[in-house]
Amino acid sequence: MKRIVRMHFRTEAIDHFLALFREYEQDIRTFEGCLHMELLRDTSHSNIFFTWSWWESEKHLNAYRKSALFGTVWPQTKALFAEPAEAWSLKEITQSKAQ
């Protein structure tokens, strides 16, 4: 299962968010069931970021979302938003070959 979360931050909160992300990224990446996680930044709007994560299953993602780790990270992150986050859970249909 793939998960994309779009986060639009207040401009003055970007450095705080990046420090927070660095502090917890290893804990999230090594959370049971997390296979991959990336932080991406919009090329046109420097205060819009995305996380792209891969989870073994929806059960694993939900366990993370109910965890103490998420309960610590998400409220701090959410407080920095200029707009509410948007999230999508996706199921892969096709896979391209690396070139």
Image (spheres, rainbow, N blue to C red):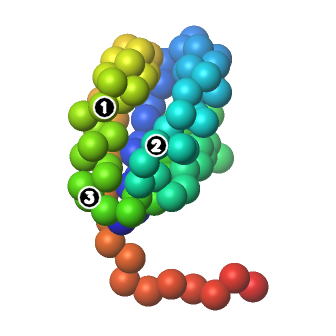
The number of numbered badges drawn on the structure is 3
Q: Is residue 39 left or right of residue 79?
A: right
Mark 2 or 3 closer to N-term? 2
Q: Which mark is residue 31?
A: 2
Where disc 2 sits, the SS reads: loop
**Disc 2 from disc 1: Cα separation:** 10 Å
Figure quadrant of residue 15: top right
Amino acid marked by disc 2: Phe
Of the two numbered discs 2 and 1 on the same chain, state the one appearing first in sequence.
Answer: 2
| Residue 22 in the image, given as x and y percentages of width and height | 64, 27
Q: Residue at x 30, y 31 (%)?
A: 67
Q: CA distance from mark 1 to mark 3?
A: 14 Å
The secondary structure type at the circle numbered 3 is helix
Please tell me whether mark 2 or mark 3 is closer to you in this view: 2
* Mark-to-mark CA distance, 2 and 3: 14 Å
From the image, tell me which residue sits under label 1.
Answer: 67
Left or right of 99? Residue 87 is left
Question: Which amino acid, by three-letter code, is at mark 3?
Answer: Glu
The relative height of residue 76 versus residue 31 in the rendered view (above or below) is: above
